[in-house]
Image (spheres, rainbow, N blue to C red):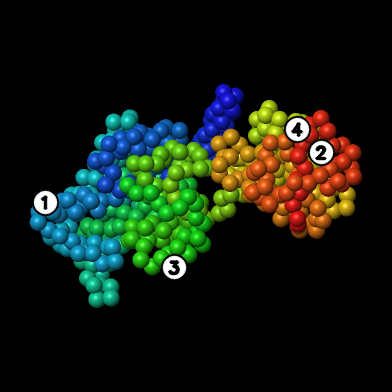
Amino acid sequence: MQNNANNSLASAIREVFSYISKFKGQLFILKIEDSLLDNPAFPVLVRDIAELHNVGIKIIIVPGTRKSIDRQLAAYGLKSEFKDGIRLTSEDALPLVEQASLGAAQRILSHLTANGINGIQGNWVQARSTGVVNGVDYMRTGKIERIEKSIIEKLLQEGFIPILPPIGWNKLGHAYNISSTELATEFSHYFSVGKLFFIGEEDGLNSALDINQAAEILKKHKKLPFAQREYLENAIRACRYGVKRVHWLSGIAASILQEVFSSRGSGTMVYANEYWNLRPAAINDIPDMLRIMQSYVERKLLVSRSQEDIEAKLSDYVVYAVDSAIHACGALHAYENKCFEVAAIAVGANYRDAGIGEAVVNFLIEKAKKLKAKKLFLLTTQASDWFYTLGFKNGTINDLPKSKRETYNHSRNSKIMVIEV
């Protein structure tokens, strides 16, 4: 048991190092809801953000300000009207909106400073009036017109974390209240963004959605709460701008470090490119494949294979890669008379409850079907119950092709299982 725990820990450490190498120098945009500012978990979140910055990830923060604005307006006896979730900002309310937004940004800045990080707050967003839309006057609520990219790039190069409250100014210096979610997303239009985060008090909808699935949710669920709809719409827009991953997670229950340094994060992810990737094995995958197989060999679940063994039949193997890290493998070996063997199924220690093994086996079954297989079999010592769930049934030695019967290891006494194809 101790050895398995060590293997699991080593696998997790390798994964973290691979992600540090991958993300170093990339830009992450973080929209952080101000509802988190008074939560006891907020200092932990900022500490984790500091750790991201310390390993070389560039960061821009956009504070959400709805709760701060509501509180500030209530203190002066003012209320806001909303249209489709958007605040209609009056002339009287605007100075209080500015004060609340700048205050939220300042609080984040103070927490960064406490963690030894140089944050900087500024007015680098140009905006214009939303105007009157469908008869509704949005007054001092505005739309983003331009972001001062060159200034922000220089600050990032000098090691600062820029903090941009959702206030924009026009060329005459008039301020407008703008959407923090739209502002965070709009950076994807100006910069090459590795990840965009929407961080609030609530978890998202699902573990992972491609943009087509996200669009389908928007289409089918017309009455989604405004925040959920806004996040999904902006996640899709960001992906179309070129962001590969948009994450929506709870800043209380989830860990941003887990979300960044593990392919199995704890929030919702919307992605533009293929995330789970089954592909043919390449020669430089072999060390990782041997590593994943090793614990199975030690438990006598798999027979031992050398690098040369795998290399000799490399075209038979597939790997399950997540963000270029190998987490599972399997093989489909061909025999005479269109018989095929499913073999070498192994999954990394941290991913055995994620359905990856099933995905590999099902992929190999489909591959056998495309090759016009007449018979598909496997040998197992301890995993028969699992293979039953995938449609395999008990077989006999007579179900094996002649060449496999001749090399069958009777001392190992593996159970023979077959499936109809």
Q: Nearer the viewer, residue 283 or 162?
A: 283
Q: Is residue 260 left or right of residue 2?
A: left
Vertical side of 148 occupied by 10: above or below? above
The residue mark sitting in front, 1 or 3, is 3
Amino acid type, label 3: Lys
User: What is the distance, in whole Å, between disc 4 and disc 3 at their CAs?
Assistant: 50 Å
Question: Which disc is residue 219 wearing?
Answer: 3
Identify the mark nearer the N-term, 1 or 3. Answer: 1
Question: Which disc is residue 75 wearing?
Answer: 1
User: What is the distance, in whole Å, between disc 3 and disc 2 at their CAs?
Assistant: 50 Å
**The residue tagged with tag 1: helix, strand or loop?**
helix
Relative image position of residue 261 (x, y in whole percent): 49, 38
Q: Is residue 280 left or right of residue 354?
A: right
The residue mark sitting in front, 4 or 3, is 4
Relative image position of residue 34 (x, y in whole percent): 27, 47
Identify the mark nearer the N-term, 4 or 3. Answer: 3
Amino acid type, label 2: Ala
Question: Which residue is the site of mark 4?
Answer: 303
Q: Is residue 307 visible?
A: no
User: What is the distance, in whole Å, between disc 4 and disc 1 at their CAs?
Assistant: 71 Å
Q: Is residue 70 visible?
A: yes
The residue mark sitting in front, 4 or 1, is 4
Identify the mark nearer the N-term, 2 or 4. Answer: 4
Question: Which residue is the site of mark 2?
Answer: 312
Relative image position of residue 45 (x, y in whole percent): 35, 38
**The residue tagged with tag 4: helix, strand or loop?**
loop
In the picture as drawn, the residue positioned furthest to the left comes out as 77
Q: Residue at x 45, y 35 (%)?
A: 56
